[in-house]
Image: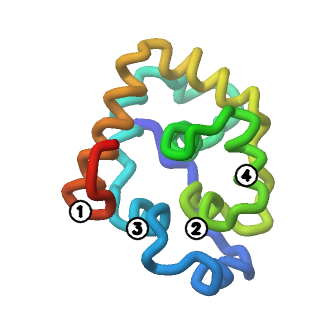
Amino acid sequence: MISNQQSLNLSPFMAIYNLVVPKDNMLRQINDLVDFTFILEELKTKYCLDNGRNAVPPIRMFKYLLLKSIFDLSDVDVVERSKYDMSFKYFLDMAPEETVIDPSSLTKFRKLRLPDEGLLDMLIGKTVEIALEKEIIKSKS
């Protein structure tokens, strides 16, 4: 199984999220209530487990694509906004001071890990379904 590759975040700045990302923020609610580990199961055949350096965690890469879809942003724009939008960083499980990915990484992730267009749609659909069940969002639009 792919490990989540995310260890306990020991940044001294993590508490800032409690000040700047309100509890009713949609991204905070989605992040807090949706268990994204289903992504690991869906993508386990797409990663080599014993070769090369650790990839950016697949859940984080998927969340970038989810942000792209929710906010109708380009790869470049979603990465740029992730540099300064604290709700994006919170959603991506990043420390406030952590650097973002290169936008080309999203293209590679889509082409190498999600070559089947239906897989991305299914993963986004499953996330929306969970968010609807938890009443974080009200409609499928």
Label 4 or label 3, whichever comes before in sequence order: 3
Amino acid type assigned to the residue bearing label 4 in the image: Arg
Q: Considering depth in this image, is 130 or 5 the residue closer to the camera?
A: 130
Q: For mark 1, give the secondary structure.
A: loop
Residue 29 badge: 3
Label 2 or label 4, whichever comes before in sequence order: 2
Residue at which label 2 appears:
8
Neighbor class of circle 3 (other Cα within 10 Å; few <14, some 14-19, many 20+) is some
Query: Based on the displayed image, in which of its 4 quarters is residue 21 positioned?
Result: bottom right
Q: Residue at x 63, y 69 (%)?
A: 9
Q: For mark 2, give the secondary structure.
A: loop
Q: Is residue 102 visible?
A: yes
Residue at which label 1 appears:
134
Residue 73 locus on image (x, y percent): 63, 38
- Residues under labels 1 and 3: Cα distance? 9 Å
- Residues under labels 1 and 4: Cα distance? 26 Å
Dot 2 and dot 4 residues touching (CB under 8 Å)? no
Question: Which is more foreground, mark 2 or mark 3?
Answer: 3
Residue 3 locus on image (x, y percent): 48, 44
Residue at which label 4 appears:
81
- Residues under labels 2 and 1: Cα distance? 26 Å
Q: Residue at x 77, y 61 (%)?
A: 84
Amino acid type assigned to the residue bearing label 3 in the image: Gln
- Residues under labels 2 and 3: Cα distance? 20 Å
Quarter of the image that includes the C terminus: top left
Colour pattern of the rendering: rainbow
Above or below residue 116? Residue 36 is below
Dot 1 and dot 3 residues touching (CB under 8 Å)? yes
